[in-house]
């Protein structure tokens, strides 16, 4: 039974790969997303995205990420703290998340 989650692999660009651009189409599992990238966005509710890491990651790495909204390409803003070193902060789009 499929749930409503989607996963967007993130491809890095720019300085030290900090500019994170979501690839579409979304994958249906984080395992598939992690075949493409070491970071992905998990989304269930429109406009909110959980950053997931394939490998343990500290705030020193993701703090500098500039993650783009899969829908409007605006910068996503963090709205929660990381749960652990793989389940990283939740982000929201301030433009299309309204
Ligand atoms: Zn957006």
Image: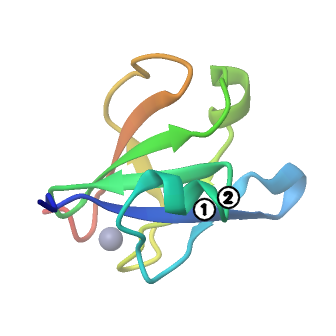
Within-10-Å neighbours for mark 1: few <14, some 14–19, many 20+? many
Quarter of the image that includes the C terminus: bottom left
Residue 55 percent coordinates (x, y): 67, 32
Quadrant hosting residue 29: bottom left
Mark number, residue 37: 2
- Counting residues from the N terminus, which is met first, the one under dot 1 or under dot 2? 1
Q: Residue at x 66, y 65 (%)?
A: 36
Residue 67: in sight, yes or no? no
Q: Is residue 57 left or right of residue 81?
A: right
Residue 76 percent coordinates (x, y): 43, 55
The residue lying furthest to the front in this view is 1
**Element marked by disc 1:** strand
Within-10-Å neighbours for mark 2: few <14, some 14–19, many 20+? some
Q: Residue at x 63, y 22 (%)?
A: 59
Ligand 1, what quadrant? bottom left
Could you tell me how far apart the alpha carbons at marks 1 and 2 are, in whole angstroms? 6 Å
Residue under label 1: 10
Quarter of the image that includes the N terminus: bottom left
- Is 57 drawn above or below residue 72 in the view shown? above
Q: Are marks 1 and 2 in contact (CB under 8 Å)?
A: yes
Q: Is residue 22 left or right of residue 27?
A: right
- Is 65 drawn above or below residue 72 in the view shown? above
**Element marked by disc 2:** loop
The residue lying furthest to the top in this view is 84
Quadrant hosting residue 7: bottom left
Q: Residue at x 50, y 53 (%)?
A: 31
Residue 5 percent coordinates (x, y): 23, 58
Q: Quick one: 91 or 85, which is closer to the camera? A: 85
Disc count in the image? 2
Residue 52 percent coordinates (x, y): 49, 41
């Amino acid at each position: 039974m499929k749930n409503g989650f989607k996963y967007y692999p993130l491809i890095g660009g720019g300085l030290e790969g900090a500019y994170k651009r979501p690839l579409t189409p979304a994958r249906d599992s984080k395992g598939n997303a992690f075949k493409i990238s070491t970071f992905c966005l998990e989304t269930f509710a429109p406009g909110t995205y959980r950053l997931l890491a394939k490998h343990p990651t500290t705030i020193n790495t993701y703090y500098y990420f500039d993650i783009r909204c899969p829908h409007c390409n605006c910068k996503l803003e963090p709205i929660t703290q990381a749960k652990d070193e793989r389940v990283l902060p939740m982000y929201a789009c301030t433009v299309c998340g309204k």
